[in-house]
Image: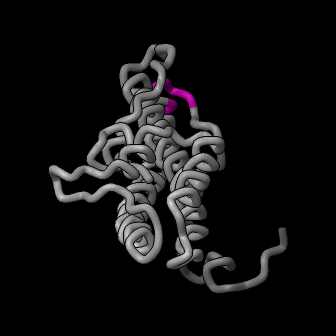
Amino acid sequence: MPDLSNENDNPIAATGAKAPAQAPSGSPIMDAFSTHLANTKARFDKTSEVSKNFATVRAGLDSLAKLGDAITSDDVIEEIGKLVAQGLSPEPLIAMMAGDPQNGVPPMPESGQALAAWVQSHEQQFVQQEQQLAQVHSMAQHQLGVAGVQGLLIHHIEAIKGGSKAPGPAPPVLAPSGPSNPLAAGAPSNA
């Protein structure tokens, strides 16, 4: 299970991902925006990756929780092996098993009710971490959408500054209202 106190496993801290620098376009505004968009996309990609890892861990915790009091340390070690085989880093998983007695986190018990309670407590912590990640991922998704709209606006402004029309549909033309305009009165068009 990822350790949110570790910056490498924390989905909130992990959103500081940086993307490779973009080639300059010649416009300082577009260059700054390209960097912003690349960073925003990298942040979204990172939270998406962490979400997939969380889904993998969730499946493992669920299968362990189903064993109830019949669970053994061998079951936990087998499940951790499966998680590592699926690409998760073994260090946080091993640290979870070892616990942190100095900070009140007990090591993994051998079997029975104590081990079932240990799995249950880690599952509760994981649910809280999933909720935090969902919020962070939603924010990254929103920021990516906002960056897309900003990009369209910047592109349009740059096109206007350059004296050319921006590609895309022409802006709507407001027709005057009144009896001389058949479309304003709802009359059918002959076009």
Whether residue 149 sits left or right of residue 66 in the image: it is left
Instruction: Report the magenta residues as a range.
Output: 159-164
**Image: 176 above or below 7:** below
Q: Position of residue 107 (x, y in %)?
A: 32, 55
Whether residue 22 is visible here, answered yes or no, is: yes
Along the line of sight, the residue nearer the viewer: 30 or 178: 30
Q: Quadrant of residue 66?
A: bottom right
Along the line of sight, the residue nearer the viewer: 79 or 154: 79
Residue 163 in magenta?
yes
Q: Position of residue 72 (x, y in %)?
A: 53, 64
Q: Residue at x 84, y 73 (%)?
A: 190
Residue 2 in magenta?
no
**Image: 188 above or below 46:** below
Work out which quarter of the rendered image holds the C terminus and state it.
Answer: bottom right
For this orientation, the residue located farthest to the right is: 190
Q: Position of residue 56 (x, y in %)?
A: 59, 56
Along the line of sight, the residue nearer the viewer: 94 or 171: 94
Q: Quadrant of residue 109?
A: bottom left
Q: Residue at x 54, y 45 (%)?
A: 49
Whether residue 149 is visible here, answered yes or no, is: no
Q: Residue at x 61, y 53 (%)?
A: 78
Along the line of sight, the residue nearer the viewer: 138 or 161: 138
**Image: 89 above or below 124:** above
Whether residue 1 sits left or right of residue 101 in the image: it is right
